[in-house]
Amino acid sequence: MQKKRVIVLASGSGSNFQALIDYAKNNDISYEICGLIVNIPDIYAIERAKLANIPFKIISHKSYESRADFEIALHDALIEMGAQIVVCAGFMRILGADFVDNWDGKMINIHPSLLPKYKGLHTHKRAIEAGDKEGGCTVHFVNSGVDEGAIIGQAQVPIFENDNEQDLAKRVLEKEHKLFPFCLEMVASNQAKLENGKCLIDGSEKIISL
Ligand code: GAR
């Protein structure tokens, strides 16, 4: 079967982007990373794309008058790069319904909390302040709600008494790098599918747990 063309959206260091590249390099799988789009010009994710010989585009949200205009440019770039699956890997822009609806069931995101807990920002700080004993990350299909789409998979980590935000972020990020490629492969191979707003794994409603 032909590999699915994946385009990654990122706004930061791109360690998850790297994990997806490495997994594709080291395993016989159903996707290939065909491009990177960033919305911030000088981020390290771009260096990673250069090192891996992956084409990239910089589409700065600041160059557009409205969110709608930015999203039209983003959509056009995804089409031009031949995207079949869109992966948000630390992409820090909220995307509107008009954009997201075009990629229904074909766009996934990783979020650094055990959703539905701690949507939005500062997830690790909030988990520590709440006295949670467990944190983690979630991969989900993207819909027009913020961090609300159907969950594909989750991975848990312990939170220890003296953890600060950085300790927890580091522990969770290691899990992200395992969970994300695995979930992407499930989507690319059609083992994980979005149907009527729910994620089906091999035909039944469940969540991948690592
Ligand atoms: C990751 O922890 C990811 O879960 C988070 O940003 C970080 C990106 O790291 N994403 C979000 O917070 C999205 N709401 P990376 O650039 O090294 O992959």
Image (cartoon, helix red, strand yellow):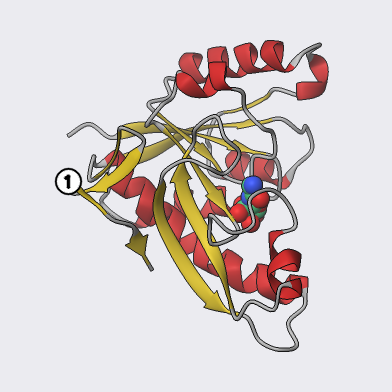
Q: Residue at x 45, y 18 (%)?
A: 102
Where residue 57 sits: x, y (%)?
63, 25
Label 1, on which residue? Answer: 203
Q: Tell me: 1 left or right of 52.
A: left
- Residue 186 seen from this side: yes
Which quarter of the rendered picture does the C terminus lie within? Answer: bottom left
Of residue 168 and residue 33, the one placed in the foreground of this image is 168
- Dot 1 falls on a residue whose secondary structure is loop
Which quarter of the rendered picture does the N terminus lie within? Answer: top left
Q: Residue at x 45, y 54 (%)?
A: 180
Q: Is residue 29 above or below residue 124?
A: above
Residue 83 found in image quarter: top left
Where residue 58 sits: x, y (%)?
69, 26
Q: Residues within 10 Å of mark 1 (few under 14, many from 20)?
A: few
Q: Residue at x 76, y 33 (%)?
A: 40
Q: Tell me: 120 left or right of 113.
A: right
- Residue 14 seen from this side: no
Q: Tell me: 172 left or right of 11.
A: left
Of residue 25 and residue 103, the one placed in the foreground of this image is 103
Looking at this rendering, what residue extends furthest in the bottom direction?
161
Residue 199 found in image quarter: top left
Of residue 91 and residue 82, the one placed in the foreground of this image is 91
**Amino acid type, mark 1:** Gly
Q: Residue at x 76, y 67 (%)?
A: 125
Q: Is residue 203 above or below residue 179?
A: above
Where residue 151 sits: x, y (%)?
42, 49
Where residue 124 sits: x, y (%)?
70, 66
Q: How many marks?
A: 1
Q: Is residue 83 above or below residue 108?
A: above
